């Protein structure tokens, strides 16, 4: 990680996308220049962007969709994902969100818990429990959420590894456009016969919900259907697996807390919320100013990209005491890991359910879980997406 000297009113920084540790620079920005301009961003070459680092300002921007539009997502990631709910605002967004939110209703979550989520984690743990050692990222966390999402969508489980690869390549499309576009095309080509089949014979899955649903008498266009599916698979798979890895690292580096959670699984709710605040998987949310405005006294011209750094906001010392620490005893307090306002994450209840079920099963099925002392210690890293690449562990072997 390298940084440039702080000047007023500018605050420049460089952080490696995959291995960076941005928290020290964000902490400095919160103190010295909480809203700072950066280099022009992709698609907005004629003007600088702005980074928002404090909680109060971040929450205001995310709630004020009339001033700070989500349409920027059509420029950044829309070319890889297609027509996105993330890029909609106002009445169009409300109508479309209401339609797809039906698929995430409480009754669906209950069914997915029994039919998809628990079987998915149990299958993975059956394979590692007898060995007494594992890399929890390679063997469990990177496979578990994508298997759940594929089940919800109606994609065969045996193809989940391929979808995991496409999801990662689409998510990081701006870093490697040819690879991102190839993954986007491949995912659509794979999904087209499934979508056509569900139109002819609807089933009890998400694709059937999408192809049969109507807004004001109009069915969703193909582009909106494929756009939502390209968003759902990366969002549901990539983000949850990283947070789950972060939670495991937190527990394994706090053995006293680990012992308490093993003895009392009700504490898993605290583990999940504190991990989401402390080390969420996606640290930034993009908006664009619709009109000339200001944030914390910093003028922002109409058309300027505004990057809300939720990872910084959730470590804002003015809101969270000892904000850099992972604290199992931290009182419940609203965080921005799932955003806020009209674009708050649609899948947040599913993510919390997956985390609770997955962590509970790991603690149950892998007793005496601990880091492997012969392997390198896990490192949570990254700028926009954060998580450990590996979590080598030992545990008491058991039969499935």
Image (cartoon, grey):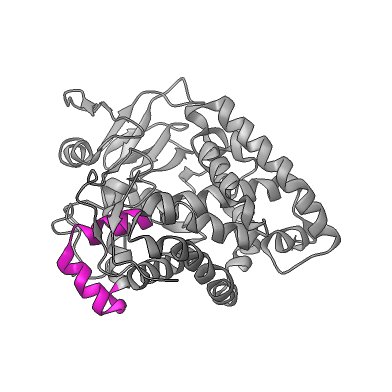
Can residue 71 be seen in the rendering of this structure?
no
Q: Residue 139 placed where, x, y %?
A: 43, 53
Q: In the figure, 110 relative to 141: above or below?
A: below
Q: Is residue 345 left or right of residue 334?
A: right
**Quarter of the image containing the C terminus?**
bottom left
Q: Residue at x 57, y 29 (%)?
A: 179
Left or right, 387 with respect to 84, comes to: left
Q: Residue at x 57, y 32 (%)?
A: 180
Q: Nearer the viewer, residue 360 or 109?
A: 360
Please give left or right for residue 275 compared with residue 374 in the image. Answer: right
Foreground of the two, 182 or 147? 147
- Count of marks overlaid on the render: 0
Query: Which residues lie in the magenta part?
Result: 244-267
x, y (%) of residue 155? 67, 56
Q: Quadrant of residue 320?
A: bottom left
**Could you tell me which residue is drawn at 51 percent across and 65 percent down?**
123
- Residue drawn at (33%, 61%), measured in percent from left and top? 132
Q: Is residue 67 above or below residue 254?
A: above
Front residue of 246 and 103: 246
Residue 347 visible in the current orientation:
yes
Left or right placement of residue 307 versus residue 229 in this view: left
């Amino acid at each position: 990680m390298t940084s440039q000297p702080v000047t007023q009113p500018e605050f420049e920084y460089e952080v490696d996308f995959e291995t960076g540790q941005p928290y020290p620079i964000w902490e400095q920005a919160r103190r010295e220049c909480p809203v700072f301009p950066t280099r022009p961003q992709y698609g907005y070459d004629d003007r600088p962007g702005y980074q928002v680092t404090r909680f109060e300002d971040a929450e205001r921007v995310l709630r004020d969709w009339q001033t700070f539009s989500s349409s920027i997502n059509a420029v950044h990631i829309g070319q890889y994902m297609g027509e996105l709910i993330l890029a909609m605002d106002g009445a169009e967004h409300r109508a479309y969100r209401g339609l797809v939110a039906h698929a995430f209703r409480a009754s669906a979550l209950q069914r997915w818990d029994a039919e998809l989520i628990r079987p998915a984690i149990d299958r993975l743990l059956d394979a590692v429990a007898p060995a007494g050692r594992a890399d929890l990222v390679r063997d469990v966390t990177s496979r578990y959420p994508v298997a759940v999402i594929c089940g919800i969508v109606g994609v065969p489980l045996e193809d989940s590894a391929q979808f995991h690869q496409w999801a990662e390549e689409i998510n990081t499309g701006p870093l490697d456009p040819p690879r991102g576009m190839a993954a986007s095309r491949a995912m659509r080509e794979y999904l087209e016969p499934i979508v056509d089949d569900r139109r002819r014979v609807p089933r009890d899955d998400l694709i059937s919900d999408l192809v049969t649903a109507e807004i004001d008498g109009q069915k969703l266009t193909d582009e909106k259907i494929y756009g939502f599916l390209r968003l759902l698979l990366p969002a549901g798979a990539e983000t949850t697996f990283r947070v789950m890895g972060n939670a495991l690292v937190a527990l394994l580096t706090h053995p006293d807390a680990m012992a308490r959670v093993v003895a009392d699984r009700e504490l898993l709710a605290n583990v999940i919320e504190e991990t989401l605040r402390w080390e969420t998987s996606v640290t930034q949310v993009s908006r664009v100013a619709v009109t000339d405005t200001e944030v914390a006294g910093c003028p922002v011209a109409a058309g300027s990209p505004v990057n809300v750094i939720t990872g910084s906001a959730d470590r804002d010392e003015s809101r969270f005491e000892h904000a850099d620490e992972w604290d199992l005893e931290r009182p419940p307090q609203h965080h921005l890991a799932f955003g806020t306002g009209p674009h708050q994450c649609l899948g947040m209840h599913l993510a919390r359910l997956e985390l609770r079920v997955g962590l509970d099963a790991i603690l149950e099925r892998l007793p005496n879980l601990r880091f492997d002392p012969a392997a390198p210690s896990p490192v949570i890293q990254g700028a926009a997406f954060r998580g450990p690449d590996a979590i080598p562990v030992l545990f008491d072997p058991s039969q499935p």
